[in-house]
Amino acid sequence: MPKVIVGSDDVYACAREAAEYLGKKGFEVLLAGSLKTRKPEPWPEVALEVALEVARGEVDFGVLVCYTGTGVSIVANKVRGVRAALCNDPVTARGARLWNDANVLVMSGRLVTDIVAREIIDAWLSVSEPDASELSNIEKLKKIDEEFRRPVT
């Protein structure tokens, strides 16, 4: 069974919906941050927890939500091997998987409704592998990641 971790710094509708919807789609869903504690949690800690699970290969991908999505994106992208993409619409989500091989989906709790969250997740899941024409760029990204970031310990 594929596994995903969903984390949020507050209990936003799109975060709750992401966890529930992915469960309905057959994923084993791990919860982080407010989805687990039911109270506000510091966004840097939530983002790091999700990013580390992804980087260690404990999950197939991660989902993060904070008010704008920017803070958790910044933190997650500091972890080697993580390619977090802020996707507040389905087209961006599909492109992030197709052209960037993103492995953490980030959404804004302020902008994304539960309905749009399902559409974003469907678009994200519609891509099984990156576009072949982008593989050289994705490899360049991975080399930059290896050169400039310390490994996860």
Image (cartoon, helix red, strand yellow):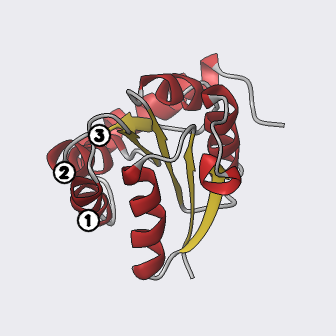
Residue nearest the observer in this picture, 13 or 125: 13
> From what the image shows, is residue 62 above or below residue 23?
above
Q: Which amino acid does label 2 sit on?
A: Pro
Where's the N terminus, which quadrant?
Answer: bottom right
Q: Which residue lies furthest to the right in this view?
A: 153
Task: Kindly state the secondary structure of the residue where label 2 is placed.
Answer: helix
Q: Which SS class for mark 3?
A: loop
Say which quadrant the C terminus sits in.
top right
Q: In 3D space, how far apart are the residues under numbered discs 2 and 1 (Cα atoms)? A: 8 Å
Q: In the rendered image, which residue does mark 3 sit on?
A: 87
- Residue at image location 57% in from the left, 37% down from the top: 9
Under mark 1, the amino acid is Asp
* Marks 2 and 1, the one that precedes in the sequence: 2
Residue 104's x, y, as percent?
A: 47, 46
- Could you tell which of marks 1 and 3 lies nearer the N-terminus? 3
Give the labeled residue for mark 2.
Answer: 90
Three-letter code, disc 3: Cys
Q: Residue at x 23, y 52 (%)?
A: 94
Horizontal relation, residue 92 to residue 7: left or right: left
The residue identified by callout 1 is 122
| Residue at the outermost top position | 148
Q: Position of residue 88 (x, y in %)?
A: 25, 40
Figure disc tally: 3
In the depicted structure, whether residue 83 falls above or below residue 62: above
Residue at figure coordinates x 65%, y 51% from the top left: 32
Describe the element under mark 1 as helix, strand or loop.
helix
Question: CA separation, marks 1 and 3?
Answer: 12 Å
**Whole-percent x and y of residue 120?**
25, 54
Q: How crowded is mark 1: few (under 14 residues within 10 Å), some or many (20 or more)?
A: some
* Residue 129 as seen in the image, left or right of residue 78: left
